[in-house]
Image: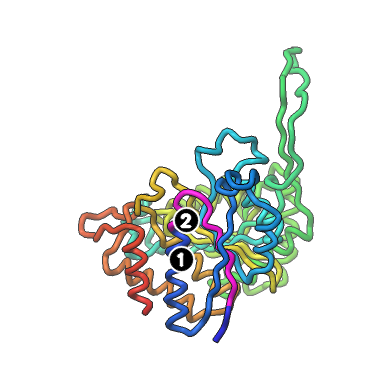
């Protein structure tokens, strides 16, 4: 019997509901396979601001470091929108990623056959299905670069610019190499195809990104390697999503492209993610969706992304592949049986259910 310590950060809005669902599914897995999951509930995000004055306390970060893995719900909401950027709930995400040294974000985008009608794309664009793994660099680039405000000087005609804000993108060879290797290793276990996304025609950081990619690609001759400018990549994702396998890209580009990939699969309510660091350190798992405060507490949230994030945790942090497969098959069976939360209830013949019943149906397919 294996024992694992999981730091659970419900966060804000629907985060509390979906993490509760994920933990209940993990308990069902525990009962079936004989594992023990111990949960430590922690505050981060808006609720932590309300309780402690900061989005993430040093004590919470330390508890996460001592855990085997971290399960996160969602953070943020309009209640805290007027706070300065450095004090907003989303700061907790950056501090968790930086503090845990989570440099690789894995975001699978899969179009479930049962939800094909939910995709906004034409049927002809979906003939090859959608099964993409977006690998996003997570602790460098624009989101972690030097930033601030300063006197902007004058326009060419002498008119004062007023305040000027700036954000800096910087990447080192070492930062690029470690994320690129993650992408190539993933590609080796999938369809052996990797697409690198940059803006090398404009950005110096992207030119280094491409140089490192091309160097590492030579070490993986079995992998078909290609590169796209980010604007072209965003267009091709819509035009022929079935042609992509693994996509590796920078922090900001990955943030944007993964949301686009999520949209074309029908609902971000179905999309999990994993944030990983060095082997032996705790990973962080979270649904891609936000805190959705407008439906919080109404039993409307789709728990599938959080449940699938728990499955990713079993696979990537604990090495429990059979158990992860069990959860993923349970999700598919639940969809096959017609159960849908409001965000994916696109057809009249589906069975419309809430968060709690959707969770119960998934558990039913596990036990």
Secondary element at tag 1: helix
Residue 296 screen position, x and y as percent: 41, 48
Task: Specify the quadrant that holds the N terminus.
Answer: bottom right
Residue at image location 44% in from the left, 45% down from the top: 293
Label drawn at residue 22 = 1
Q: Residue 224, can we see it?
A: yes
Residue 119 is left or right of residue 190, and the answer is left
How packed is label 2: few (under 14 Cα within 10 Å), some, or many (20 or more)? many
Residue 138 lies, with reference to residue 188, above or below; the image says above
Residue 90 screen position, x and y as percent: 60, 46
Secondary element at tag 2: helix
Residue 348 is left or right of residue 94, and the answer is left
Q: Nearer the viewer, mark 2 or mark 1?
A: 2
Q: Residue furthest front?
A: 51
Residue 161 lies, with reference to residue 62, above or below; the image says above
Within the magenta stretch, is there residue 164? no
Work out whether mark 2 precedes mark 1 in sequence or the reverse, and give the earlier one: 2
Q: Quadrant of residue 352?
A: bottom left
Residue 228 screen position, x and y as percent: 60, 53
Tell me the magenta residue range.
4-17
Label drawn at residue 16 = 2
């Amino acid at each position: 019997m294996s024992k694992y310590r999981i730091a659970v950060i419900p966060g804000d809005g629907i985060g509390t509901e979906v993490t509760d669902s994920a933990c209940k599914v993990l308990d069902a897995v525990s009962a079936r396979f004989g594992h023990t999951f111990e949960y430590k509930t922690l505050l981060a995000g808006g609720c932590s601001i309300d309780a402690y004055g900061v989005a993430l306390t040093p004590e919470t970060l330390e508890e996460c470091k001592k855990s085997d893995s971290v399960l996160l719900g969602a953070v943020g909401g309009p209640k805290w929108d007027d706070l300065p950027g450095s004090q907003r709930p989303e700061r907790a995400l950056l501090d968790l990623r930086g503090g845990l040294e989570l440099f690789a974000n894995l975001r699978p985008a899969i179009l479930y056959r049962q939800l094909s009608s939910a995709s906004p794309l034409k049927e002809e664009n979906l003939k090859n299905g959608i099964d993409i793994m977006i690998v996003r660099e997570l602790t460098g680039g624009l989101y972690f670069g030097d930033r601030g405000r300063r006197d902007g000087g004058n326009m060419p005609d002498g008119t004062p610019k007023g305040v000027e804000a700036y954000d800096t993108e910087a990447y080192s060879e070492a930062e690029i190499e470690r994320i690129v290797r993650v992408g190539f290793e993933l590609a080796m276990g999938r369809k052996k195809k990797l697409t690198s996304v940059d803006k090398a025609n404009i950005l110096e950081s992207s030119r280094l990104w491409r140089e490192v990619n091309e160097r590492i690609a030579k070490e993986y001759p079995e992998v078909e390697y290609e590169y796209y400018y980010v604007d072209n990549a965003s267009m091709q994702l819509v035009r022929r999503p079935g042609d992509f396998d693994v996509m590796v890209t920078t922090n900001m580009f990955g943030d944007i492209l993964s949301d686009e990939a999520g949209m074309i699969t029908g609902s971000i309510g179905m999309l999990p993610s994993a944030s990983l660091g060095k082997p032996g350190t705790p990973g962080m798992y979270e649904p891609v969706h936000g805190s959705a405060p407008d439906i919080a507490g109404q039993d409307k949230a789709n728990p599938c992304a959080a449940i699938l994030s728990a499955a990713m945790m079993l696979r990537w942090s604990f090495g429990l592949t059979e158990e992860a497969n069990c959860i993923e098959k349970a999700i598919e069976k639940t969809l096959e049986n017609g159960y849908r939360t409001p965000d994916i209830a696109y057809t009249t013949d589906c069975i419309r259910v809430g968060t709690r019943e959707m969770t119960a149906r998934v558990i039913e397919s596990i036990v």
